[in-house]
Amino acid sequence: MLPPGPRIDARLRSPFAAPPEVPVHLEMSDLTGLRGAGTLVTLRPLAPSDEGAFVSLVASSTDYWAPWTPARSARIPLRERFRRECMRAELGAAAGSHLRLGGFLADGTLVGLFALNEIVRGALQSAHASWQIGVDWAGRGLGTDGGRALLDLAFAPEPEGAALHRVQANIMPANAASLRVAEKLGFRQEGLARAYIRIAGVWSDHSMWALTAEEWSTRR
């Protein structure tokens, strides 16, 4: 039986492994508590007291949103969906990977949902933006107003914002309302992602739009 060979540090087995003094994990910023304000819409995290408003918003707008959003199981009650949304938002903010907010009018009415998803740090400093306005408030400029508040949060320096460099929005070409919001906010169209997201059982193309911090600063 041969004697055991020398122990090899696992970090030296690959030429691409980071040396011991270089941290492999990139630090993420805690986004808990971030809020934004437009002229008409205020963005803040959903609270337990928002459950009824969330259920009402989603119940009334599900058919309106269906052509543009991934299908959700009808077997999940809306109150359970609210609980999961709050948990996802809380965990994502604490981890610095997501910022999911409700859009509220001055009287406290919940009119939509806004988010910065898939936040990446390191050399990218980017995220994907999304917005949904309830069917009862569509066509009133609330998506644009809330989107403006969301981008202010995205590009503002810490701790007031997420200090991102680039925000992308992927929109189905037939979604005229969201395309108008992207254009009004100053997003640039960069291309077309073929069969990007499965919507209503079909892998759907999405138009790719983007905006950088430098571009946003010239519009403010």
Image (spheres, rainbow, N blue to C red):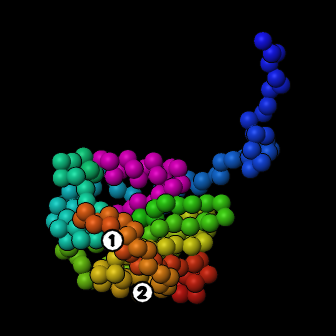
Q: The residue tagged with tag 2: helix, strand or loop?
A: helix
With 135 as the anchor, is 20 left or right in this view?
right
- Callout count: 2
Q: Is residue 96 magenta?
A: yes
Q: Residue at x 80, y 15 (%)?
A: 2
Q: The residue tagged with tag 1: helix, strand or loop?
A: strand
Mark 1 Cα within 10 Å, few/some/many (few <14, many 20+)?
some
Q: Residue at x 24, y 46 (%)?
A: 80
Which quadrant of the view contains residue 105? bottom left
Q: Which residues are magenta?
A: 83-105
Tell me whether the residue at label 1 lies in contact with that at label 2, contact meaning CB atoms closer than 8 angstroms: no
Question: Above or below — where is 147 with respect to 81?
Answer: below
The N terminus lies in which quarter of the figure?
top right
Q: Name the amino acid type tagged 2.
A: Glu
Mark earlier in primary sequence (1, 2): 2
Q: Residue at x 28, y 51 (%)?
A: 82
Q: Residue at x 53, y 50 (%)?
A: 95
Question: Above or below — where is 165 with respect to 217?
Answer: above
Q: Foreground: 211 or 90? A: 211
* Nearer mark to the viewer, of 1 and 2: 1
Q: Which mark is residue 204?
A: 1
Residue highlighted by disc 2: 183
Q: CA distance from mark 1 to mark 2?
A: 21 Å
Q: Foreground: 34 or 93? A: 93
Q: Name the amino acid type tagged 1.
A: Ser
Tell me residue 27's x, y (percent).
Answer: 64, 52
Q: Is residue 167 magenta?
A: no
Tell me residue 125's x, y (percent).
Answer: 61, 65
Q: Foreground: 151 or 25? A: 25
Tell me residue 40's x, y (percent).
Answer: 35, 78
Mark 2 Cα within 10 Å, few/some/many (few <14, many 20+)?
few
